[in-house]
Image (cartoon, rainbow, N blue to C red):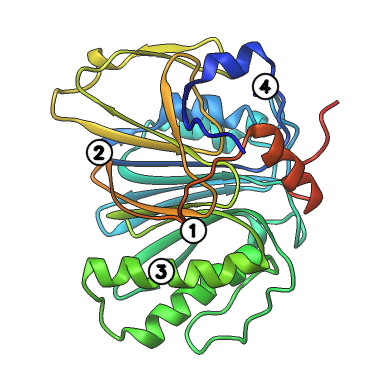
Amino acid sequence: MVLSHCYNASYCLETQAFKGIPMCQLLGMNCNTPTDIVFSFEGFRLRGGLTDSHADGFGIAFFEGKGVRLYHDDKPSASSPVADLIKTYQIKSESVIAHIRKATQGEVNLANTHPFVRELWGEYWVFAHNGNLRHFQPEVGEFYRPVGNTDSERAFCFILEQLRQRFPQKPEQAVLMEHIACLVKDIREHGLFNFLMSNGDMMFAHASTLLHYIVRKAPFGEAVLLDDDINIDFAAVTTPNDRVAVIATLPLTTNEQWQQLAINELVCLRAGEVVFSDAPEPKQYMSIEEGLCIARSVGAAGSID
């Protein structure tokens, strides 16, 4: 296992360990002020059919107040008109979840396209998953049932069902985090369970294999996309009080220090910073090559041509 979890992505670019990696992709943003995700999304979307081979659809959800803007397309994100709309619309949000799909269970259609959305305690919850949960067939819940036939939606419905059964009213934040951590430990026994989940305030991120994040705050600098020839000077578009956390399967930029989640680590972010972490000790970190090998073994990644 790789012991270093903070590194410059340009090293992996030079060793060609990043570009053309064919695996499902997750993208999340959690921040303390409404922010657009156009810069990160522009690099991310290219991994759905251009810099990455996956073309089984994509989706993105933006929280706005108590509401959610949800966009799905069962076509590749790199060439999707829906993705073009996201680029030009420049929606500002404090919490965003996006997903590029490599189908492992369930047909390629809109019903099986992430992210999934449900209501719990009078709030919308959004969920997206990268992996493959084999033999995960929980009993049909009283309150939450999947619409499609993916393991991902079953896992989401299971989490919300257990929370609703255990807590008729929303519990304190610390209690909620601990209970979600327990549920995640049960589910990940069934296989690969990288996911993002948010209610617009808290964003949970769990890594079975590969998941990275960066917290951008003052003093802001320039960032250069890995998947496209685009750069941005964040100092010109932010205030000194802004704090933005971006989470992705693999780092999106070449010149910034990204943090890697440990194997089986669950974190919760609020207002652009990590406020909770649960991970086995000692922490271990997976290399990209190891993560790809595991993803291929469960059908969550293709081969590199």
Q: Residues within 10 Å of mark 3 (few under 14, many from 20)?
A: some
Mark earlier in primary sequence (2, 4): 4
Quick check: 139 left or right of 184? right
Could you give the CA–CA distance between mark 3 and mark 1, rounded to whole angstroms?
Answer: 13 Å
Per the image, the residue denoted by label 2 is 34
Q: Residue 136: image x %, image y %?
A: 68, 74
Q: Nearer the viewer, mark 2 or mark 3?
A: 3
Q: Give the quadrant of the C terminus.
A: top right
Per the image, the residue denoted by label 1 is 127
Residue at 53 percent of width and 74 percent of height = 157
Regarding mark 2 in the picture, which secondary structure is present there? strand
**Residue nearest the observer in this picture, 178 or 89:** 178
Could you give the CA–CA distance between mark 1 and mark 4, rounded to whole angstroms?
Answer: 26 Å
Quick check: 114 left or right of 160? right
Residue at 56 percent of width and 45 percent of height = 99
Regarding mark 4 in the picture, which secondary structure is present there? loop
Q: Nearer the viewer, mark 3 or mark 1?
A: 3
